[in-house]
């Protein structure tokens, strides 16, 4: 059976996207043939199904909307920067379909005192991480979601990731760690405030890890 609608088109249409696990399983069986394996030997018999299940989990975010997690805000008249650091994430690089993982660090300045619970920020990171992804885009999408759904006055996001496609293959840079940043609102337009917020996030992230 051929899916008539591409995932991207389904997303634009706002449709929840069920992952076609049978189709994934067929493709994995093909991959096993292609690498010279025998998909019918004992150890591999259930593998296509298991991979399909794992992929359904890893790409679940395609069918999810960060807005649902960020819709439940509460009032907190503080006017100060709120930071949440060391949010662990697991994602899949869209160039090699290999995992990358690390921590996301978020700081935002609420507008009109609209803030969101800690777990909702972690959920937001997860929605964007569980897709075929690029770390740069992941970073931007988290920042954009906070502006779009919380109407945050300013946002700083720092993402640190280790990419299996770099560690396992090619140049094998085992210890390479990629760091990406995104700034929005006042933290983008006001260079001094942006840099200060970024420094704060860096300090907090490293303190938590030490
Ligand atoms: Zn890659």
Image (cartoon, rainbow, N blue to C red):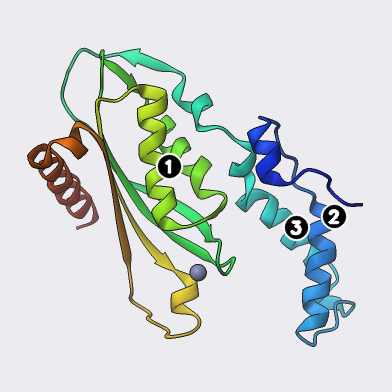
Q: Residue at horizontal 85%, vertical 64%?
A: 26
Residue 148 seen from this side: yes
Report the side of 47 relative to 200 (left or right).
Answer: right
Between the C-alphas of marks 3 and 2, the distance is 7 Å
Closer to us: mark 1 or mark 3?
1
Q: Give the SS element for disc 2.
A: helix
Compared to 56, does 167 lie above or below? below
Q: Residue at horizontal 17%, vertical 36%?
A: 189
Q: Mark 1 or mark 2, which has the lower sequence index? A: 2
Towards the viewer: 209 or 82 = 82
Q: Which residue is mark 2?
A: 22
Between the C-alphas of marks 1 and 3, the distance is 26 Å
Closer to us: mark 1 or mark 2?
1
Ligand 1 neighbours mark 3 (CB distance < 8 Å):
no
Q: Mark 1 or mark 3, which has the lower sequence index? A: 3
Looking at the picture, how far across and down is residue 69, in whole percent?
49, 27
Residue 118 seen from this side: no
Q: Which mark is residue 52?
A: 3
Towards the viewer: 207 or 32 = 32
The quadrant of the rendering that contains the C terminus is bottom left
* Whether label 3 touches label 2, CB < 8 Å: yes
Looking at the picture, how far across and down is residue 183, in whole percent?
26, 42
Q: Which residue is mark 1?
A: 141
Q: Give the SS element for disc 1.
A: helix
* Whether label 1 touches label 3, CB < 8 Å: no
Report the side of 48 relative to 71 (left or right).
Answer: right
Towards the viewer: 121 or 198 = 198
* Label 1 packing within 10 angstroms: few (<14), some (14-19), many (20+): many
Towards the viewer: 209 or 173 = 173
């Amino acid at each position: 059976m051929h899916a008539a609608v591409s995932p991207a088109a389904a997303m634009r249409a706002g449709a929840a996207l069920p992952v076609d696990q049978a189709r994934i399983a067929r493709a994995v069986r093909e991959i096993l043939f292609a690498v010279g394996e025998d998909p019918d030997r004992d150890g591999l018999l259930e593998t296509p199904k298991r991979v399909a299940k794992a992929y359904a989990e890893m790409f679940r975010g395609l069918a999810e909307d960060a807005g649902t997690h960020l819709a439940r805000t509460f009032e907190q008249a503080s006017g100060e920067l709120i930071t949440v650091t060391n949010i662990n994430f697991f994602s899949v690089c869209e160039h090699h379909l290999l995992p990358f993982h690390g921590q996301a660090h978020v700081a935002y300045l609420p507008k009109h005192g609209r803030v969101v619970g800690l777990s909702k920020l972690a959920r937001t990171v997860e929605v964007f991480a569980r897709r075929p992804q690029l770390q740069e885009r992941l970073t931007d999408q988290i920042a954009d979601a906070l502006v779009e759904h919380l109407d945050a006055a300013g946002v700083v996001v720092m993402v640190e990731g280790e990419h299996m496609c770099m560690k396992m293959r090619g140049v094998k840079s085992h210890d390479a760690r990629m760091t990406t940043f995104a700034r929005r609102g006042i933290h983008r337009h006001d260079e001094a405030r942006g840099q200060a917020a970024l420094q704060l996030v860096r300090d907090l992230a490293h303190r938590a890890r030490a």
